Image: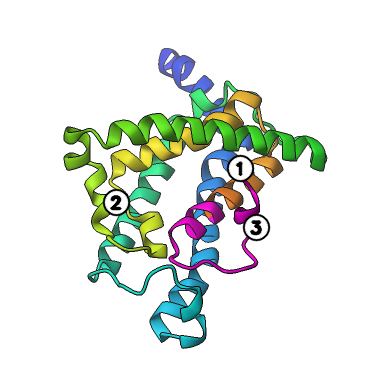
Amino acid sequence: MDQLTFFIQPILNIYQDDRCLWFSIYAVLFSIISYIILALPYLIIDHLKITRFNKYRIETKTNKNLGHKSIFLFILNSILLFCLSVIFWPLLSLSQINLSPFPGFIISILQILFFLMLDDLLFYFYHRHLHSPFLYHKVHRIHHSYRHSSVLAAIHFHPIEYILISLSFYSGPLLLGANVWVFYMWIFLRQWIGVSGHCGYKFPWEWQKHIP
Protein backbone atom coordinates (compact mmCIF):
# COMPACT_ATOMS: atom_id res chain seq x y z
CA MET A 1 0.00 0.00 0.00
CA ASP A 2 2.84 2.37 0.85
CA GLN A 3 4.51 1.60 -2.46
CA LEU A 4 1.27 2.28 -4.34
CA THR A 5 0.87 5.59 -2.51
CA PHE A 6 4.49 6.41 -3.34
CA PHE A 7 3.70 6.21 -7.08
CA ILE A 8 0.17 7.65 -7.07
CA GLN A 9 0.63 10.63 -4.74
CA PRO A 10 2.95 12.59 -7.08
CA ILE A 11 0.39 12.19 -9.89
CA LEU A 12 -2.42 13.36 -7.62
CA ASN A 13 -0.33 16.38 -6.65
CA ILE A 14 0.06 17.30 -10.31
CA TYR A 15 -3.70 17.23 -10.81
CA GLN A 16 -4.23 19.39 -7.73
CA ASP A 17 -2.35 22.17 -9.48
CA ASP A 18 -4.82 25.03 -10.13
CA ARG A 19 -3.47 25.32 -13.65
CA CYS A 20 -5.06 21.95 -14.44
CA LEU A 21 -8.52 23.43 -14.01
CA TRP A 22 -7.82 26.51 -16.13
CA PHE A 23 -5.76 24.97 -18.92
CA SER A 24 -7.21 21.46 -19.21
CA ILE A 25 -10.84 21.72 -18.13
CA TYR A 26 -12.15 25.29 -18.21
CA ALA A 27 -10.24 25.98 -21.44
CA VAL A 28 -12.09 23.23 -23.32
CA LEU A 29 -15.43 24.46 -21.97
CA PHE A 30 -14.55 28.05 -22.93
CA SER A 31 -13.64 26.89 -26.43
CA ILE A 32 -17.03 25.18 -26.82
CA ILE A 33 -18.91 28.21 -25.53
CA SER A 34 -16.88 30.57 -27.75
CA TYR A 35 -17.77 28.61 -30.87
CA ILE A 36 -21.46 28.53 -29.97
CA ILE A 37 -21.58 32.28 -29.28
CA LEU A 38 -19.75 33.13 -32.50
CA ALA A 39 -21.59 30.65 -34.71
CA LEU A 40 -25.11 31.25 -33.39
CA PRO A 41 -25.82 34.48 -35.36
CA TYR A 42 -24.91 32.75 -38.64
CA LEU A 43 -27.00 29.70 -37.76
CA ILE A 44 -29.98 31.96 -37.01
CA ILE A 45 -29.54 33.87 -40.27
CA ASP A 46 -29.40 30.63 -42.26
CA HIS A 47 -32.25 28.96 -40.39
CA LEU A 48 -34.61 31.94 -40.66
CA LYS A 49 -33.40 32.72 -44.20
CA ILE A 50 -33.11 36.44 -43.44
CA THR A 51 -32.95 37.97 -46.92
CA ARG A 52 -31.33 41.27 -45.89
CA PHE A 53 -28.04 39.39 -45.46
CA ASN A 54 -28.14 37.69 -48.87
CA LYS A 55 -25.97 40.40 -50.44
CA TYR A 56 -23.17 39.41 -48.06
CA ARG A 57 -23.27 35.71 -48.92
CA ILE A 58 -20.21 34.42 -50.75
CA GLU A 59 -22.26 31.78 -52.59
CA THR A 60 -25.94 30.98 -52.86
CA LYS A 61 -25.69 27.19 -53.07
CA THR A 62 -26.39 25.17 -49.95
CA ASN A 63 -25.08 21.87 -48.63
CA LYS A 64 -26.93 18.64 -48.19
CA ASN A 65 -28.25 18.23 -44.66
CA LEU A 66 -25.15 17.60 -42.55
CA GLY A 67 -26.20 19.48 -39.43
CA HIS A 68 -26.88 16.46 -37.23
CA LYS A 69 -23.58 14.84 -38.18
CA SER A 70 -21.73 18.10 -37.52
CA ILE A 71 -23.23 18.39 -34.05
CA PHE A 72 -22.35 14.74 -33.35
CA LEU A 73 -18.73 15.33 -34.44
CA PHE A 74 -18.58 18.53 -32.39
CA ILE A 75 -19.70 16.68 -29.25
CA LEU A 76 -17.43 13.71 -29.96
CA ASN A 77 -14.36 15.85 -30.63
CA SER A 78 -15.02 18.09 -27.62
CA ILE A 79 -15.21 15.05 -25.35
CA LEU A 80 -12.06 13.67 -26.95
CA LEU A 81 -10.17 16.93 -26.43
CA PHE A 82 -11.41 17.16 -22.85
CA CYS A 83 -10.23 13.62 -22.07
CA LEU A 84 -6.85 14.07 -23.77
CA SER A 85 -6.19 17.42 -22.09
CA VAL A 86 -6.84 15.83 -18.70
CA ILE A 87 -4.91 12.64 -19.41
CA PHE A 88 -1.88 14.53 -20.71
CA TRP A 89 -1.97 17.25 -18.06
CA PRO A 90 1.13 15.82 -16.30
CA LEU A 91 3.02 16.44 -19.54
CA LEU A 92 1.40 19.83 -20.21
CA SER A 93 2.20 20.92 -16.66
CA LEU A 94 5.91 20.77 -17.45
CA SER A 95 5.51 23.92 -19.56
CA GLN A 96 5.57 27.43 -18.11
CA ILE A 97 1.86 28.14 -18.68
CA ASN A 98 0.79 30.12 -15.66
CA LEU A 99 -1.91 31.90 -13.66
CA SER A 100 0.08 35.07 -13.10
CA PRO A 101 -1.54 38.53 -13.52
CA PHE A 102 -2.35 39.78 -17.02
CA PRO A 103 1.00 40.68 -18.67
CA GLY A 104 -0.29 43.74 -20.53
CA PHE A 105 -1.69 44.31 -24.02
CA ILE A 106 1.61 44.76 -25.88
CA ILE A 107 3.11 41.50 -24.64
CA SER A 108 -0.23 39.75 -25.12
CA ILE A 109 -0.57 40.94 -28.72
CA LEU A 110 3.02 39.96 -29.55
CA GLN A 111 2.51 36.50 -28.09
CA ILE A 112 -0.79 36.01 -29.93
CA LEU A 113 0.87 37.08 -33.19
CA PHE A 114 3.47 34.38 -32.57
CA PHE A 115 0.69 31.86 -31.87
CA LEU A 116 -0.98 32.83 -35.15
CA MET A 117 2.16 32.46 -37.23
CA LEU A 118 3.16 29.15 -35.66
CA ASP A 119 -0.38 27.79 -35.98
CA ASP A 120 -0.49 28.85 -39.62
CA LEU A 121 2.91 27.29 -40.32
CA LEU A 122 1.92 23.99 -38.73
CA PHE A 123 -1.42 24.13 -40.53
CA TYR A 124 0.39 24.29 -43.86
CA PHE A 125 2.31 21.09 -43.20
CA TYR A 126 -0.42 18.92 -41.72
CA HIS A 127 -3.05 20.21 -44.15
CA ARG A 128 -0.77 19.46 -47.07
CA HIS A 129 -0.37 15.87 -45.86
CA LEU A 130 -4.10 15.57 -45.23
CA HIS A 131 -4.56 16.08 -48.96
CA SER A 132 -2.40 13.07 -49.79
CA PRO A 133 -4.60 10.33 -51.31
CA PHE A 134 -4.61 8.01 -48.27
CA LEU A 135 -5.20 10.63 -45.55
CA TYR A 136 -7.69 12.53 -47.66
CA HIS A 137 -9.81 9.43 -48.19
CA LYS A 138 -9.57 8.22 -44.59
CA VAL A 139 -9.57 11.51 -42.67
CA HIS A 140 -9.82 14.86 -44.45
CA ARG A 141 -12.70 13.87 -46.73
CA ILE A 142 -15.00 14.27 -43.71
CA HIS A 143 -14.34 18.02 -43.57
CA HIS A 144 -14.88 18.34 -47.31
CA SER A 145 -18.33 16.81 -47.00
CA TYR A 146 -19.32 20.47 -46.99
CA ARG A 147 -19.14 21.48 -50.62
CA HIS A 148 -20.15 25.05 -49.85
CA SER A 149 -19.33 27.47 -47.07
CA SER A 150 -21.13 26.92 -43.78
CA VAL A 151 -20.40 27.83 -40.18
CA LEU A 152 -20.97 24.16 -39.29
CA ALA A 153 -18.01 23.20 -41.47
CA ALA A 154 -15.80 24.80 -38.81
CA ILE A 155 -16.60 21.89 -36.47
CA HIS A 156 -17.01 19.12 -39.04
CA PHE A 157 -13.75 17.19 -38.58
CA HIS A 158 -12.60 13.62 -38.28
CA PRO A 159 -11.23 13.09 -34.74
CA ILE A 160 -7.70 12.61 -36.07
CA GLU A 161 -7.82 15.93 -37.91
CA TYR A 162 -9.30 17.58 -34.83
CA ILE A 163 -6.38 16.32 -32.75
CA LEU A 164 -3.92 17.75 -35.30
CA ILE A 165 -5.72 21.12 -35.18
CA SER A 166 -5.61 21.06 -31.38
CA LEU A 167 -1.90 20.21 -31.28
CA SER A 168 -1.19 23.09 -33.64
CA PHE A 169 -3.35 25.39 -31.52
CA TYR A 170 -1.64 24.44 -28.23
CA SER A 171 1.92 24.61 -29.57
CA GLY A 172 2.46 28.37 -29.28
CA PRO A 173 1.10 28.80 -25.74
CA LEU A 174 3.05 25.78 -24.51
CA LEU A 175 6.29 26.97 -26.10
CA LEU A 176 6.04 30.50 -24.67
CA GLY A 177 4.48 29.50 -21.37
CA ALA A 178 1.38 31.60 -21.90
CA ASN A 179 -0.50 33.42 -19.19
CA VAL A 180 -4.05 32.10 -18.68
CA TRP A 181 -5.65 35.35 -19.87
CA VAL A 182 -3.57 35.41 -23.04
CA PHE A 183 -4.44 31.75 -23.59
CA TYR A 184 -8.17 32.48 -23.36
CA MET A 185 -7.82 35.45 -25.71
CA TRP A 186 -6.11 33.09 -28.14
CA ILE A 187 -8.91 30.53 -27.80
CA PHE A 188 -11.55 33.13 -28.61
CA LEU A 189 -9.55 34.57 -31.52
CA ARG A 190 -8.90 31.13 -33.01
CA GLN A 191 -12.57 30.24 -32.82
CA TRP A 192 -13.42 33.57 -34.44
CA ILE A 193 -11.03 32.83 -37.30
CA GLY A 194 -12.50 29.36 -37.76
CA VAL A 195 -16.09 30.60 -37.74
CA SER A 196 -15.52 33.61 -40.02
CA GLY A 197 -13.45 31.51 -42.42
CA HIS A 198 -16.24 28.96 -42.91
CA CYS A 199 -19.41 30.99 -42.35
CA GLY A 200 -20.14 31.76 -46.01
CA TYR A 201 -20.57 35.50 -45.47
CA LYS A 202 -18.32 38.46 -46.15
CA PHE A 203 -19.40 41.45 -44.11
CA PRO A 204 -17.82 44.90 -44.67
CA TRP A 205 -16.85 45.24 -40.99
CA GLU A 206 -14.74 42.06 -40.86
CA TRP A 207 -11.28 42.88 -39.55
CA GLN A 208 -9.53 39.94 -41.25
CA LYS A 209 -9.70 41.55 -44.70
CA HIS A 210 -7.33 44.27 -43.46
CA ILE A 211 -4.64 41.72 -42.51
CA PRO A 212 -2.46 40.17 -45.27
Query: What residue would you read off at disc 1?
Result: 22
Task: Choose the circle earlier in sequence order: 1 or 3.
Answer: 1
Q: Which residues are magenta?
A: 192-212
Query: What residue would you read off at disc 3?
Result: 207
- Residue under the point 38% across and 65% down: 150
Query: What residue would you read off at disc 2?
Result: 143
Callout 1 crowding tier (Cα within 10 Å): few <14, some 14–19, many ≥20:
some
- Residue under the point 71% across and 36% down: 99
Q: Position of residue 74 (x, y in %)?
A: 36, 56
Instruction: Judge by depth and name the residue closer to the eye, 32 or 2.
Output: 32
Task: Choose the circle earlier in sequence order: 2 or 3.
Answer: 2
- Residue under the point 45% across and 72% down: 57
Instruction: Judge by depth and name the residue closer to the eye, 93 or 177.
Output: 177
Q: Is residue 92 left or right of residue 161?
A: right
Q: Amino acid at mark 3?
A: Trp
Residue furthest out toward the top: 3
Give the CA separation, mark 1 to mark 3.
29 Å
